């Protein structure tokens, strides 16, 4: 119990010492945008703290590489429930997104872990065959698999799609 009190006290000290921006999404969830004192990679990096009835979530995302048409973005999060024991996060995860504009190809790789329930890993690739201002045709494939948890490892789930979008 004393660790929870210390954790909450530290969170309150940090929150009171820094000006926060409150953002709200379409579901009414409120997110606090924490300003970064020094951004190393890109001004598009964002760190957020979200608190609701269940717990607290800390997230960070930003651009890792942006050079010669190659873009690599990353994001990570950790969440902790108010009523769960200890200081370890209950859930954490992240994702890397790669985009190559000249070849119109993108890929992603990510994982999420929930304490006591295992890890979900996912990866996928997408390619646009034709793209202009008003029309886009592409295809993609993806895979996802569950590791660990009370039911053990799950089978690999594979999927694919063909997509066409147009603006009329």
Image (cartoon, helix red, strand yellow):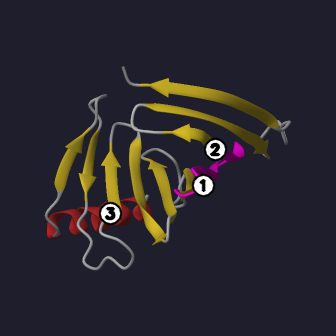
Which mark identifies residue 30?
none
Give the mark nearest the N terminus, 1 or 3: 3
- Nearer the viewer's eye, disc 1 or disc 2? 1
Rendered location of residue 53, percent (x, y)? 34, 36
* 89 versus 130 height, above or below: below
Disc 3 element: loop
Placement of the N terminus among the 4 image quadrants: bottom left
Residue, disc 1 = 103
Placement of the C terminus among the 4 image quadrants: top left
Disc 2 element: strand
> How far apart, in angstroms, are the residues tagged by discs 1 and 2?
8 Å
Q: Residues within 10 Å of mark 3 (few under 14, many from 20)?
A: few
Q: Is residue 161 left or right of residue 23?
A: right
Rendered location of residue 44, percent (x, y)? 32, 63
Residue, disc 3 = 44
- Nearer the viewer's eye, disc 2 or disc 3? 2
Between residue 151 and residue 157, name the one nearer to us.
157
108 is within the stretch colored magenta = yes
């Amino acid at each position: 119990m004393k660790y929870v009190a210390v954790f909450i006290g530290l969170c309150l000290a940090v929150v009171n010492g820094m000006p926060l921006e409150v953002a709200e999404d379409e579901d009414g969830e409120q997110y606090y945008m924490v300003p970064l004192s020094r951004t190393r990679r890109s001004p598009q990096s964002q760190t957020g703290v979200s608190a609701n009835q269940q717990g607290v979530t800390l997230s960070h995302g930003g651009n890792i590489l942006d050079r010669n048409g190659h873009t690599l973005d990353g994001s990570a999060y950790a969440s902790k429930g108010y009523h769960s024991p200890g200081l370890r996060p209950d859930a954490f995860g992240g994702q890397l997104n790669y985009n190559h504009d000249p070849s119109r190809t993108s890929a992603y790789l990510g994982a999420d872990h929930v304490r006591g329930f295992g890890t979900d890993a996912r990866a996928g690739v997408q390619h646009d065959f034709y793209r202009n201002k008003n029309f886009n045709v592409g295809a993609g494939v993806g895979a996802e698999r569950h590791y660990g948890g009370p039911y053990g490892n799950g089978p690999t789930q594979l999927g694919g799609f063909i997509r066409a979008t147009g603006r009329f």
